[in-house]
Amino acid sequence: MINYIPNQKNINWLHITTVLVLALIAISAGIGLRDPWIPDEPRYVLMAKNMVDTGNWIIPYRGIEIYSDKPPVFMWLIAALYSLFGSINITFLLPSLFSAMGVLIITYDITRRCWSHNTAIISVFILLGSYQFMLQAKAAEIDMTLTLFTTFALYGLIRTLYLNDEHRWLYLAFLSMGIGVITKGVGFLPILLLFPYAYTRMRKWADRADNVITPKQWSISVLMLMIPILSWVMLLLYELFVNQNHEVSAYINDIMIRQTMHRYVDSWHHQRPFYYLIVSLFTLWFPAILVLPWAIKNLYLKFKDKNSLSFSLFIWIALVVLFFSISPGKRGVYILPALPAFALLMAPVVEIVLGKKTFKQAARLLVIVVSLGIVIFSVSSMYIENSLLDKYMLPMHFWIAMLCLGVFGVVLWYASKQYIHGSTALIIILLGAWFNYGLWAYPSLNQRYSARYFMNNIDIKIGVNYEVGILQWREGMLLHTARPFKDFGLSTPLQTQIINAKEWLEGDRNRRLLVQKPVMEKYLSNYESSYFDNRKHREWFVIKPINL
């Protein structure tokens, strides 16, 4: 039997509850104070709202067009919460909040089972101390929900394959992967853990688990993986044959071929060099990634001692990064599912080095650098012209709150000499910064990143008596429109949109067309136009029919 459970039942409920409450406060701060922000949030929220408004939950629609870039689970979650609460601004961030808290709890529990309660607290701190985790926890994007399912899948695999737990955890792991696949196609990533697991079994590492999985149990696991996927496919077939929605055929072909295999092999956007994600680790997982200099030696010793779990986690993280690095199209958010495994891998190593003098000094140094940086940045933003205070329209009380946080950080730095560890002080400061960002910055940044204010100007500048069409609209415009506007499609070729727009515009004298300046100058220069507004450095104009 594998010996990974030194203090399994030694749970300090006060410790973990305090940490989770602080995390909940920092992540949830600002919910209800902002709209969905560009580029991705308005898209998912628009489709979720459309599901509730139309009653069609099977196929996501973006305006008049089907949306086949991503499977529907994330949109379903937002739609279900919107149906329950009736407010987009309150509900659209909740799936990421719940997912982030779930990831923290799962990571804590599996780390505790593998090592101890204290180690598990460290793993939670590693997640909370990672920029990418907190950023995605406070954003309405698919990836945190995906990470919940992949983390639970890892949880089940580790409990069965490495901790000799019941086989039901293996089945639940594959079921979670299946749900992950219909959340975002890469939900199968935890299955890559089977490669290092098989290697350690073949090499007969001394601490390997002796839990033998029979062919029948593997077959049941695969069936569990397929249940969510086949259920989704059955819904699509129902929509195609029973509801006679013939757009489903194009949807299935696009989402299963073009948006998966074709996109992976020959991506048409987000093209980055092979090493991009490796470099991104040092920024997106900052400052947690700074434990590496102290971890390398200890990880080497674990590998040398044939610690199968640590070895498998390391190889799995490397395989995830390699998998996405091979594809020409890549974004930093793709590696988020590997972050909980990184926390699980690093936590026992960090526990070892916590008492080392160099680590303590480095943690204290980072605390004072971050604290003084916050103080200097806040003061300069309040008193220097053309600062961030002006550029992003951040209110004075935000910078006052940040200044107080910086001063508090200096106090924590002094206290870290004797009363508190520098790493704990750093986590407190970072959570405070995220709290201030949500509570004080959200309302001010909303005008910059929300389309609500742009769309409100339509009735003011154009008038309520005119029917309005928009070329090259974005999802936030359709989400925040006070009244319907003519939709010429978003993925429809521009030339086709312009032809349809001209025909529509000339059909009634009480119609107006909103277009961006480059399109107006190139294709609609013979029409009478007037300046409308500027959004994200793009000038918009109102076009009137020629035959008034």
Image (cartoon, grey):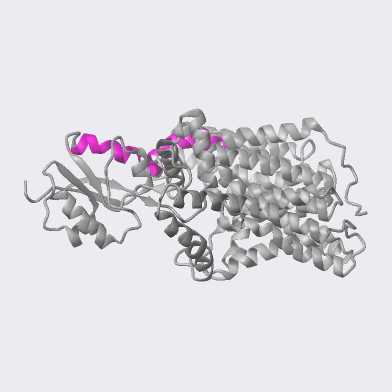
Magenta highlight range = 435-462
Magenta span: chief secondary structure: helix
- Where residue 510 appears, as percent x and y from the top left, is 13, 41
Count of numbered circles on the image: 0
Which residue sits furthest left?
Answer: 548
Between 60 and 158, which is closer to the camera in this rendering?
Answer: 60
Residue at image position (20%, 58%) is 499
Would residue 379 be found to the left or right of residue 302 on screen?
A: left
Q: Which residue is depicted at the point 18% across and 50% down?
A: 504
Q: Residue at x 49, y 38 (%)?
A: 79
Indicate the position of residue 403 as horizontal and vertical percent values.
55, 36
- The answer to whether any part of residue 433 appears in the image is no
Residue at horizontal 54 percent and vertical 40 percent from the top: 77
**Horizontal arrangement in the rendering, residue 511 relative to residue 128 (left or right):** left
In the picture, the quarter occupied by the N terminus is: bottom right
Magenta segment: does it hold 446? Answer: yes
Magenta-span inclusion, residue 43 = no
Report x, y in % for residue 388.
Answer: 43, 44
